[in-house]
Image: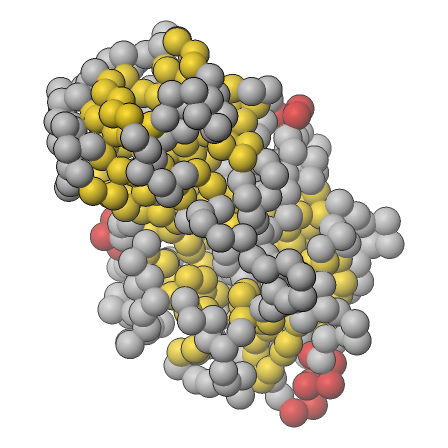
Amino acid sequence: MLSACSRSSLRRAVALGATCLLVFALAPSVAQADVELHLPAVDPGQVTAWGGAANVQEALTPPAGLDDAVAVAASDTPGSYSNLALRSDGTVVGWGLNKYGEASVPDDLSKVVAIDTGAGFSMALGADGSVRTWGVNDAGQLDVPSDLGPVTAIAAGGYLGYRGYGVPYAACGFALALRPDGTVVRWGQDGDGVGCDQLDARMNPPAGLSDVIAISAGDRVALALKSDHTVVAWGPGVFPGLDGTWFDNWSDVTAISAGTGNSLGLRSDGTVLAYGIWGEAGPPHVSDVTALSASHNDLFLHTDTTISAYPGTLGLPTGAGYQAVSAGNDYGLAIEAAPHGGETPPPSGPPLGSAEVQPDVDTNPPGSVEAFQYTASDDAVASTFHVFLDNQNQAQSVVVGVYADQAGEPGVLLSSGKSTAVVAGEWNSIPIPQVVVKDGARYWLALLGPRATGAISFRDLPNGSGGPTRLGRQTDLSATCGLPVLWRSGINFANSPASAYVD
C-alpha cells in the first residue's frame, strides 16, 4: 500500500537533448499503451544558421523552403556539422556534412514530435512514443532496447573516441529516454568498444532516480530535471571532485541543457545556472532567458526574442524575432518567429483559464483540492500559474497544478507549483515547470489549500460559461505531498469557472 506521500510520477516533458533545450509537457495518457504526444508549441518558422569554419558554412546553410520548422537540433560533436529540423507536418529534414549519416533521415519517418542528434547518430520521437535512430553504430547507440516501450522524451549525446594513431575516431554515442513513470533508460556501449571506454556503468542513471520530467545528454554527462525543480547529474563528464552533489545547490530549475564540458540550468526567474568549464557562477550578465542550449559556445534566447552567446558571438544574428535556439560545437541554429498577420490577430487574454475576477467566493477546507476544466485558446508554453485569492482566504500556502484532460476528468498531472507567500485579495503568481498547452485541447487547473494551513478562499462563478468542476475525494492533502497524481473525484459541479489561469 502506498503511504500518503508516496506517488508514481506520470508527469511528462520533452527535452531536445544537449543541442536544443526546451522543456515541454506532453499530452495525456496514463497507460503506456496509450501514449499520445504533440509537436512543440512553436509557430512554424524559418530556420537560420550562423558560425562554423569558413569551409563548412555552405553545408550549414538550411535547405531552401525550410520555413515551417518547430524544432531544430545542431550537432555538439566536433567536426560533425550536421543538423535536423522538425517540420510542422511531423516530418524531419537533415542537412550538413553528414559525416556519419546522422543527417540522412529515413524516408518513412513521419508523425515525429521531438528530435535530437548526438555523436554520429540522430533520434526521433514519434507521437505514439516510439523511438527511431539512424547514423553510425560505433557504440550501439542505434540499438533501441526491445523492451523500451513508449517513452515521452529522448536525448542524444556522446563524444569522439580515440582508437589509435592514423585510425578514424569512433563516434561514441549514447541515448536517453524518459518513460511515462518518470524513470530514465540509457543505451550505448558499456566499455568494450575501442575508443568508447568512457561509456561504462557511470553512464547508467543513478539507482532510484524517479519523478523525472526532462532529460538532456551531453558529451559524457547526462542530466535529469525532476518535478521538484531540482537536477540530478551523472557520467564521467561530471568532473572529479565536482560530483553530482554540485547540483544539490540547483533549485527552481525549469529547463536543462548538457553540452561539451559544461551544463546549464534555467531558473523560473530567467536567470541561468552553470556547471563545468564556465564555473558555478555561470555566464555573466545573462538574464530574462526563456530557453538555452549548451555547447562550447552557449546560446540564450531572451524574453525580447533576441539571442546572446557565451563566451563568443559566433557571428550571432542581431536583432529580435527568434523563438528557438540550438547550439552546435562552434555554430548555432535558430527558428525565426512567424509574425501574426492578415485577418487573424493573436488571441487576447490568457491561453488557458480565466483572468477575470469572478463575483462569487468559494471556500474549501484545508487538505481539499478542486479542479476546473478549461479549453485552451492558443498554443503556448506556460510557466506561471495565476490565482486570485479572496480577502477571506486563510490558507498560508497554496499548491496549484495543471492536469491533462482524460475523458472529461483530470488525467495526467502535467505541472505543479507551490507558494508560501500568498496574499489575500490579490492575484498570486506562482512559478510552475513549463507546460505546453495546445489550442482547442482541454485541461484542468487545480487549487489546493494544504492541510494545517487554513481554508483556501478563491473566486468562481457557479453556473457560469466555463467547463465542469471536480472536487477531489482526498481531504487530507498536505503541502509536502502536494496534488494527487492519480485524481479521484468526489463532488462534481457543472460550469463553474474560477479566477485562475496560466501563461
182 versus 4 height, above or below: below
Q: Name the residue rendered at 66%, 37% in the picture.
A: 129
Which residue corresponds to the image point at 72% horizontal and 68% vertical from the top-left?
A: 67
Up-down: is 106 above or below 395? below
Residue 438 falls in which quadrant of the image? top right
Tally of numbered tags = 0
Image position of 274 (left or right of 329): left
Q: Quadrant of residue 398?
A: top left
Name above or below for residue 364 compared with residue 499.
above
Residue for point 69% across, 90% down: 55
Quadrant where the N terminus is found in the figure: top left
Which residue is at the front of the view, 10 or 205?
10
Q: Position of residue 133 (x, y in %)?
A: 72, 50
Near-viewer residue (10 or 376): 376
Could you tell me if residue 460 is visible in this image? yes
307 is higher (above) or lower (below) than 401: below
Image coordinates of residue 378 in percent, x first then y, are 56, 48
| Left or right: where 452 falls relative to 473 | left
Q: Nearer the viewer, residue 426 or 338?
A: 426
Q: How is the image coloured?
A: secondary structure
Q: In the image as oriented, which residue stretches furthest toward the right?
A: 107
Answer whether residue 484 is visible to the viewer in this image: no
Between 353 and 232, the one nearer to me in the picture: 353
Q: Position of residue 290 (x, y in %)?
A: 42, 62
Toward the bottom, the furthest residue is: 54
Q: Position of residue 255 (x, y in %)?
A: 41, 54
Q: Residue at x 43, y 38 (%)?
A: 353
